[in-house]
Amino acid sequence: MSIGRPQEFNYDEVLDRATETFWILGYDGTSMVDLLSKTGLSKSSLYQTFGGKAELFQKCLENYTRFMSKSLLNELKKYESGKDFIEYVLISSTKEANSKTKPRGCFIMNTATEFSKRDSAILGYVENGISEFRRIFILALAKSQMNGEIDKHLDLEEVSFYIISVMTGLRTLIKGGMKEAEALTTIKLAMTCIK
């Protein structure tokens, strides 16, 4: 009985390359030629393993959310102060301001901007990504409440949404040319609201 040819590529590496391609070019700006070139797959291998362009894009959104969630949770473990962690994340979001390459922004929010509400399936992946990031900020805020850094009556759901808004707003503005000093001033002001 034939079991077929084994995969001759690393699934996760290919998914990472596809994620990078969509992140830089956007969904509409990415062609199948781009995907085949960046992943090194044949057209048949890509379709057999990942489905079409839309299915691959959805897998990339999941991949990005999973990667960012794991990275943020690992970073949170290093901080005794939840507020310090939040400030670190916000400051990290400004690093593209001094980059010599074109700022990419946040893949999830880029997707939200590109698709708006035209595709309910994609919107679901965007909402999932935002919810996951908010969950991590809520964990950080809860740590700060336990440490007495912030008011114990603070609504963590509301504050987590505020933090997401600041972070994604900064990354979008930096794509539009916002300077690092301006971004850092905004972060300083935003942190005074979390008390």
Image (cartoon, rainbow, N blue to C red):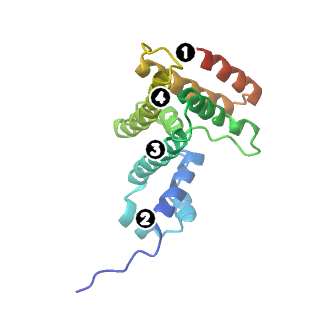
Q: Position of residue 189 (x, y in %)?
A: 65, 16
Q: Find numbered disc 1 in the image and state the secondary structure of the residue it sits on.
A: loop
Quarter holding residue 91: top right
Between disc 3 and disc 2, the foreground one is 3
The relative height of residue 52 versus residue 93 in the rendered view (above or below) is below
The residue tagged 1 is 195
Q: Are the residues at dot 3 and dot 2 in contact (C-beta closer than 8 Å)?
A: no
Q: Earlier in the sequence, mark 1 or mark 3?
A: 3
The residue singled out by tag 3 in the image is 65
Task: State the SS at label 3.
Answer: helix
- Seen in the picture, residue 79 relative to 193 is either above or below; the reply is below
Provide the residue designation for mark 4.
Answer: 143
Q: Gap between marks 1 and 3, in whole Å?
A: 28 Å
Mark closest to the chain's N terminus, 1 or 2: 2
Image quarter (top left, top right, bottom left or bottom right) of the N terminus = bottom left
Identify the amino acid type marked 2.
Answer: Leu
Closer to the eye: label 4 or 1: 4
Q: At x 34% / y 40%, what residue is drawn?
A: 121
User: Residue 62 in the image: x percent, y percent?
Assistant: 42, 47
Distance CA(mark 4)–CA(mark 3): 22 Å
Circle 2 packing at 10 Å, graded few (<14), some (14-19), many (20+), is some
**Labels 2 and 4: the sequence-earlier one:** 2
Q: Is residue 173 visible?
A: yes
- Residue 195 in picture, x, y percent from top left: 55, 15
Q: Verify CB contact (< 8 Å) between mark 1 and mark 2.
A: no
Q: Secondary structure at mark 4?
A: helix
CB contact under 8 Å: marks 2 and 4: no
